[in-house]
Image (cartoon, helix red, strand yellow):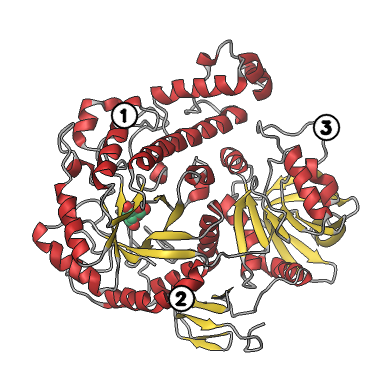
Amino acid sequence: MYVGVDYYPEHWPESMLEKDLDGIKELGANMIRIGEFAWHLMEPQEGQFDFSFFDKVIKEAKKRNLSVMFGTPTATFPAWLAAKHPSILSKDEYGHVRAFGGRRQYCFNSPEYNRYAAKITEEVVKHFADEPAVVVWQIDNEFGHEGSDWCFCEHCHSGFHHFLEKKYQTVDELNERWGTIFWGQTYNSFSEIPMPVPTVTTHNPSLKLDYTRFRSESVNNFAHKMTDITREHAGSGQPITTNVSGGFFDKAFDHAENVRVMDFVSYDNYPVWGGLTEPIAPAAIAMTHDFNRGLKDQNYWIVEELMGAQGHNVIGYLPRPNQAKMWSYQAFAHGCTNMLYFRWRGMTKGAEQFCFGVVDQDNRYGRKFKEVQSLFSEIQPYEHVLNEKIESDIAVLYDYDNIWSWKSQVQSASFDFNAELLRLYAPFYRHNASIDVIPTDRAFEKYKVLLVPVMQIIDDELAARLKRFAESGGTVVFSFRAGLKNRDNNIHFEQTLPGPVADLAGIEIYETEALAAHQSVPVKSKDGKEGSGKVWRDLVTPAGAEVIWQYSDEFYEKQAALTLNKFGEGSVYYLATGLDSEVLEPVALDIIKKHDIWHTETPAGTEAVKRNGHLFLMNHTGRTQHVCGETLAPYESKVIQYKKNNGQK
Ligand code: GAL
């Protein structure tokens, strides 16, 4: 098992190297991650490759039995390259060139960038291919992060035309499928088609979705090309990964496709960043882990685990003592097998002066150092547990086409895809059930429960797969707007909502309403309980389904807000509005019990994960809590043996 830190030896005088590595060793680490931003150091002038600095670092690391994850440095290119070929710089939607000075401001479609990136990747991989200490390659750094997935330059415009031509073959076919007759936008040739840059009102929805698909292809083609080069030149014991950043549902590329060619997924886990006044909710953090595990349906690494407060120009919440360690336990509980902390020491110069590390600018080995040290020694005995595959009975389905469709037409000003996914995920998480987060094209027959949040793009094939799943006994949970659109991002014609899954859900929807952030609608249950719905409401007429909750405001008291349909051997729920957690947690519990899925009840803000005869317990609160028969101090986390009837189910 590898545990370690992200180390940037090039940031410090060489005279500090040996003492730093001794300190890293004292921390209990056996790996350093290096190199990913050091292109200029490796190629200070065009064609002059020099890896001697990292040769020295690796020589010293080896003396201390430290292994190395090496990053190919294409996320930050040298100034000489931008000066020589300004066309490598990407452009924002207003056509403004993104200046040299930040990072990842390259265009994925720039032939020059591809050429230079290929060359440095080849040179660095060849140089260290036979180096036994280099045990993993990382490709680039956080593809698509910080808005770098979008570009609107000339390369991208002509690339988009080729993408469309390949997809539609004839412009007539495109005109028909996009419905360009609307507002007289019919194209005579592919070259007339604009990118979705600012215009008056808004662009055609099919164009917007296709441009996002083109972005996805652009990012992934580049990532795959760099991976192929690395694979061709890497040594035999050198697998390949790339680090996935947070905010993955907000990005314009398909992540499962991105990592398809990698050997394993790595994730950068930052439960709090920038100006956040508090960390994201425990369920939201858990979901990010389940998503990363779902990308290749296998366990994954964390190669940037937060220890200190982080932010570029603004910082916020400081993780409380033991809180970052607890987030690490949570990651291990959800499938992380190897972990590196960001970063060994915070840098006193440059853009990340406020991204604090295990050690701060005073260079003392203080509270955070001891916290990491204790984590490293406590977790390693559980390596065999961490390496076991996690099998879940519940899966959340997502589809990037659907997410992008929502992104370009949010319909309700209060809509947020992440929040809607969590609306279905969190009630099951609250009962500590294990959940996978997977793309819709993954085989899902093995699950007992499928959560299908706001899936407005549903084609006949997906509808048929979901029907087979329910028929053979599975439970499907839909939320509002299901089945509205086809893959061209157009509304299904002559179908009553929820379109291709109307019979599956046993309902009909004739009218719908968007709810603004300050609006909510009252709902009541069959047995007189009260709750509320937000964001959206479909007015549901049952057509076979049983009504469990209904609206209780005037005009709509007869319309259903939550229904349950029997379909074959299975059950299908439809949430017509953004129901609150008080409504959904009991519903989740009914489903969990019906399918006999492992769960346990723990106090709010705590978490228990059962894995291979063990329980991982996490206290996400600043108060002492009693969880599964154990007392957990504020932010404490631990692994215990799983025993039935010990306050545990
Ligand atoms: C990550 C990134 C690192 C560093 C870190 C700061 O997103 O990969 O290079 O910028 O954030 O918190």
Q: Is residue 77 left or right of residue 164?
A: left
Q: Residue furthest left?
A: 15
The CB of the residue at mark 2 lies under 8 Å from ligand 1:
no
- In percent of width and height, residue 78 lies at 22, 37
Callout 2 environment at 10 Å: few (<14), some (14 to 19), or many (20+)? some
The dot on residue 115 is 1
Q: Do the residues labelled 1 and 2 touch (CB within 8 Å)?
A: no
* Residue located beneath label 2 in the image: 382
The CB of the residue at mark 3 lies under 8 Å from ligand 1:
no
Look at discs 2 and 3 and give the one toward the viewer: 2
Q: In which quarter of the image is the C terminus?
A: bottom right
- At numbered mark 1, what does the secondary structure look like: helix, strand or loop? helix
CA separation in Å, label 3 and label 1: 50 Å
Callout 3 environment at 10 Å: few (<14), some (14 to 19), or many (20+)? few
- At numbered mark 2, what does the secondary structure look like: helix, strand or loop? helix
State the residue at coordinates (45%, 20%): 158
CA separation in Å, label 1 and label 2: 44 Å
39 in relation to 347, above or below:
above
* Residue located beneath label 3 in the image: 494
Q: Is residue 105 left or right of residue 10?
A: right
Q: Which of 472 and 409 is in front in this view?
A: 472
Look at discs 3 and 1 and give the one toward the viewer: 1
Q: Which of 541 and 284 is in front in this view?
A: 284
- In percent of width and height, residue 408 lies at 57, 37
153 in relation to 348, above or below:
above
Quadrant in the rendering for residue 95: top left
205 in relation to 29, above or below:
above
State the residue at coordinates (80%, 49%): 468
- In percent of width and height, residue 296 lies at 54, 52
